[in-house]
Amino acid sequence: MSGILIAVAAIAVLAAIFGLLLGFASIRFKVEADPIVEQIDAILPQTQCGQCGYPGCRPYAEAIANGDDINKCPPGGQATIEKLAALMGVEVEDSAHDESKGIKKVAFINEDMCIGCTKCIQACPVDAIVGGTKAVHTVIKDECTGCDLCVSPCPTDCIDMVPVEMTPETWKWELNKIPVVNIPTDASANKVE
């Protein structure tokens, strides 16, 4: 019985020593991340589509922090460009992003032509396409980011990018654009006698 207690105590002591060593190492060898990269990455849409020329949103955020253009993200649109411009303190032209690309599009699979090869499923970075091998595939409209990466691998050209129908939910509401003017009031003019 005492042999078991000695073994448990020895393991507990070793665990405590290694825990202290790991705690010390995490403080001593801490690597500071660039906070501007974190802020830029939070603004980007996180579709990981690669349309900007980088393999994902994080590498593009690092490139922007190092001075790359802020208008290379088609899924983010003009709103993302404006947020990035405000964060980086640069001017942005109204035409910095092509508005025709700003219209949200989603993939549509012509199910009569689909052969179920799964190449579009493998190409989709956000898993918006469902289906099995040699079965008809379909696109989950709410998940599709419109990155267009599923179109080119399709051997039967059965995938088209179609604009999303405008509804009250998808309309570009600009409710925060109403100008607010503070009119200074004279304290003596408001005084009631």
Image (tube, rainbow, N blue to C red):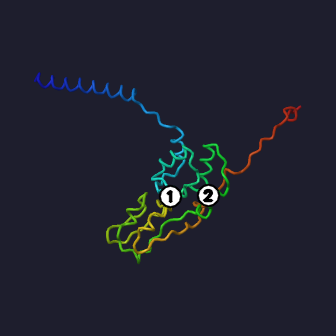
Instruction: Tell how many labels.
Output: 2
Considering every residue shown, the one lying at the far bottom of the view is: 112
Residue at position x 54%, y 40% from top?
Answer: 36
Marks 1 and 2, how far apart at CA: 13 Å
Few, some or many C-alpha atoms within 10 Å of disc 2 (few <14, some 14-19, many ≥20)? many
Quadrant where the N terminus sits is: top left
- As shown in the figure, which amino acid type bears the numbered disc 2? His
* Mark 2, residue position: 97
x and y percent of residue 59 in the render?
Answer: 47, 48
x and y percent of residue 172 in the render?
Answer: 62, 59
- As shown in the figure, which amino acid type bears the numbered disc 1? Gln
x and y percent of residue 112 in the render?
Answer: 41, 78
Left or right: residue 56 versus residue 117 is right
Quadrant where the C terminus sits is: top right
Q: Which mark is residue 51?
A: 1
Considering every residue shown, the one lying at the far right of the view is: 193
